[in-house]
Amino acid sequence: MRFTSRTMTLVLFLLLGFSCKKEKQAAEEKAEVKKDTVLNYTNLPSLQELDDQATQLVAPWKEYQDWERSFGFMERATTKEDLLLAVEDLLSKQDTLDASSPPKAFQVLPIESRQKVIRTHLMQLKAALQDETPTDSSMAAIYRARNSWRNQMNVLLRSPLDSVMERALLAPEIEEENPTP
């Protein structure tokens, strides 16, 4: 069997085209996997633990327990879709938590403001996921805000002076709402 230069050129051209098509498919599959995979969040701050006293106070607070469970789902998300679902669930739980009645010791402005900060960072993470932009800084901000919230709970229980000072600062507002006859 004898090959002409024209036949050889045609065979080489077909092989080259087939090879390029396979490389293009491999690159597309790799890009799709990369797009679907969440970055490895190894540089996140370690999580602040609650003191024993704070843990006892939040134990019966069902909405807080639900929120913490959802936070755990967010930590274990492996794809951007999973993370987005976890963040949406966490935002829903945040609404329920905000509407709930926390233990009396935690019904103070520093706790409420830290909850709002967490919500803000959760919304930023959701936007980053929807826009397909990097999520590292948003995740780190959520961890820092959660640590700040838990640390504030611990501080409030260790230092009764904080709650005394807050009541003193809010006293003028309370008097305006309830004027004495």
Image: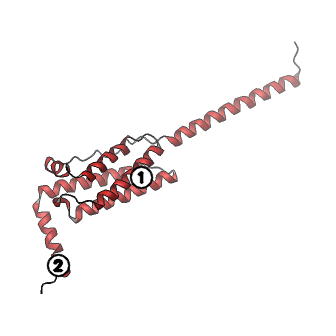
Horizontal and vertical percent position of residue 42 = 37, 41
Residue at figure coordinates x 46%, y 56% from the top left: 127
Quadrant for residue 96, please give it: bottom left
Quarter of the image where the N terminus is located: top right
| Residue for badge 2 | 172
On the picture, is 105 further left or further right than 94? left
Does the image show residue 137?
A: no
On the picture, is 46 further left or further right than 155? right
As shown in the figure, which amino acid type bears the numbered disc 2? Pro
SS label for mark 1: helix
SS label for mark 2: helix
Real-space CA distance between mark 1 and mark 2, rounded to the nearest whole angstrom: 39 Å
As shown in the figure, which amino acid type bears the numbered disc 1? Glu
Q: How many marks?
A: 2
Horizontal and vertical percent position of residue 20 = 70, 32
Does the image show residue 109?
A: yes
Horizontal and vertical percent position of residue 118 = 33, 57
Q: Nearer the viewer, residue 10 or 48?
A: 48
Q: Which mark is residue 88?
A: 1
Horizontal and vertical percent position of residue 15 = 75, 26
